[in-house]
Image: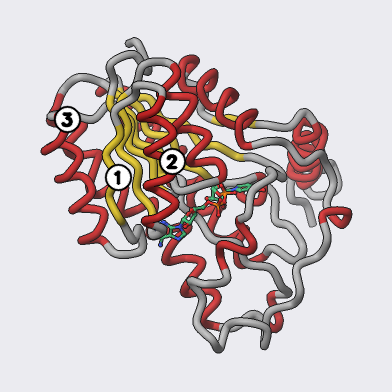
Amino acid sequence: MEAFKDRVAVITGAAGGIGSALARAFAERGARLVLADLDESGLEAVAKGLEAKGAQALTVRTDVSQRESVEALAEASWRRFGGVHLVCNNAGVASFGELATAAHEDWVLTMSVNFWGVVHGVESFVPRLIEQGNGGHIMNTASMAGLIGMQWLGVYSASKFAVVGLTEALRRELAPKRIGVSVLCPMMVDTKMTGNSLPVRTGDLRGQNETPAPGAESFVGNIISPDEVAVRSVRGIERNDLYILTHLEQREILRHRAARIDSSFGDDVWPLTE
Ligand SMILES: NC(=O)c1ccc[n+]([C@@H]2O[C@H](COP(=O)([O-])OP(=O)(O)OC[C@H]3O[C@@H](n4cnc5c(N)ncnc54)[C@H](O)[C@@H]3O)[C@@H](O)[C@H]2O)c1
């Protein structure tokens, strides 16, 4: 299936960062866009930029943590365009800090956006895509932190591991329906995610239990642009890759993880003898 030309793509978290870069990349390839985010002025700015280049874009203020809000997004998408082909469940919030001191509210907020936001996208869009009977593609944004548990990012990692697991299962289930499924797992991308995440947090959450974000130098790997992530996403969707990875550095880290798992089958423990 042609992935973008004359297709309708819904993107959550589209007011900036990776979501807006996806919107530009899809529009350049002929897609019509439904842009969803909490940030209405950001959405308008992205839509204006796309429309100036001749693309069609509908903006829908959406809170992905609320099931009815995502349901309203799906209804608005079908109402405006009569169909949807590509759904990017991309909205997310950052959370830094050690697990021992993580605020309970931080768990709730992070899971409600990063995990439940994707679940709501699946609940509202997958049955409609199946009923439409015309194939399509779902891309969920997880993170490298969804493939390897990272210090400082335990809460965030848990939310993103959940997205990876859900996406792997969804891919198997939707393959017979000719609906492709991918999980986007970037390492560091040059966006305003940390700053954007603060206003959506409660007063209690800010500053008290939260460890200050470690500097970029604390993490391994390059910081790449959202536009590069978008081009890699386009390629991954066209190829129907399960994992869309963005940094070559990921390869070695993931090999190391696989080797550590494999080492659990060492001769000293397998088979089990007295
Ligand atoms: N920036 C990185 O280094 C990086 C790395 C790996 C994964 N990611 C993931 O990429 C995705 C996009 O993040 P980004 O880096 O572009 O950051 P970003 O802050 O620019 O984009 C996230 C968008 O989600 C929106 N959002 C937050 N809560 C929402 C809600 N409840 N409902 C609707 N919209 C909501 C924000 O307003 C924002 O526009 C996220 O899922 C993030 O976890 C980012």
Between the C-alphas of marks 1 and 3, the distance is: 12 Å
Q: Secondary structure at mark 2?
A: helix
User: Which amino acid type corresponds to the residue marked 2 in the rendered image?
Assistant: Val
Q: Nearer the viewer, mark 1 or mark 3?
A: 1
Q: Secondary structure at mark 1?
A: strand
Q: Nearer the viewer, mark 2 or mark 3?
A: 2
Residue 49: x and y in percent read: 44, 34
User: Which amino acid type corresponds to the residue marked 3 in the rendered image?
Assistant: Phe
Assign the N terminus to one quadrant of the image: top left
Residue 7: x and y in percent read: 29, 20
Q: Of residues 72 and 131, which is closer to you in this image?
A: 72
- Pointers 1 and 2 in contact (C-beta within 8 Å): yes
Residue identifier under label 2: 46
270 over 214 or under it: above or below: above
Mark before the other along the chain sequence, 1 or 2: 2
Residue identifier under label 3: 81
Q: Name the residue: 60% across, 62% down.
A: 94
